[in-house]
Image: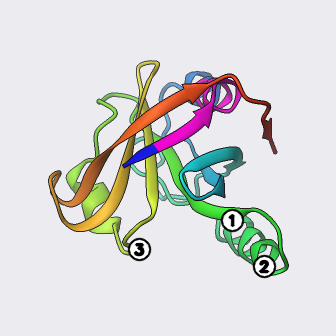
Amino acid sequence: MTVRISRGVLQRILAHAANEPVREVCGLLLGSPLRVENARETANVALDPASAFEIDPATLFGTLRAERAGGPRILGHYHSHPNGSPTPSARDAVMALQPGRLWLIVARGEARMWCEWPGGAMHGAFDPVELVVDDAQDGCT
């Protein structure tokens, strides 16, 4: 599987992570199938944001309501691993409950895309996705 993302959206996600180097940051990936067109930063409401992430439920539910009303589709989410690599952790695998959702993980200025899939190659929960960065117009909310 290949997923496209604009350079501007990816740069903003990487900047979000760089601005909070000791906390996991997170947000929603929005777009059309196989193309991330936008990203929405969310608060990390995890009890220990230095080592875990939890997307703010109010933002998630608001975005789901907007999607149902014809707004942008939620493709998945992004989060950072401040002291790790851009690969899913065992903790991420436990959180993988929506097959087909995209996970963009950033660490140390690098980003990798994963698709949540039962029996996947990584921790039995994720398969790697080829991420193609292009220069198309984009936005970030």
> In the rendered structure, does residue 11 fall within the stretch colored magenta?
yes
Q: Based on the displayed image, in which of its 4 quarters is residue 55 positioned?
A: bottom right
Mark 3 crowdedness (10 Å alpha carbons): few <14, some 14-19, many ≥20: few
Q: Earlier in the sequence, mark 3 or mark 2?
A: 2
Instruction: Return the residue at label 2.
Output: 65
* Front label number (3 vs 1): 1
Q: Amino acid at mark 3?
A: Gln
Residue 98's label in the rendered image is 3
Asked if marks 3 and 1 touch (Cβ < 8 Å), the reply is: no
Q: Earlier in the sequence, mark 3 or mark 1?
A: 1
Instruction: Return the residue at label 1.
Output: 73
Q: Amino acid at mark 1?
A: Arg
Give the magenta part as a residue range: 3-14
Mark 1 crowdedness (10 Å alpha carbons): few <14, some 14-19, many ≥20: many
Q: Residue at x 65, y 57 (%)?
A: 32
Quadrant including the C terminus: top right
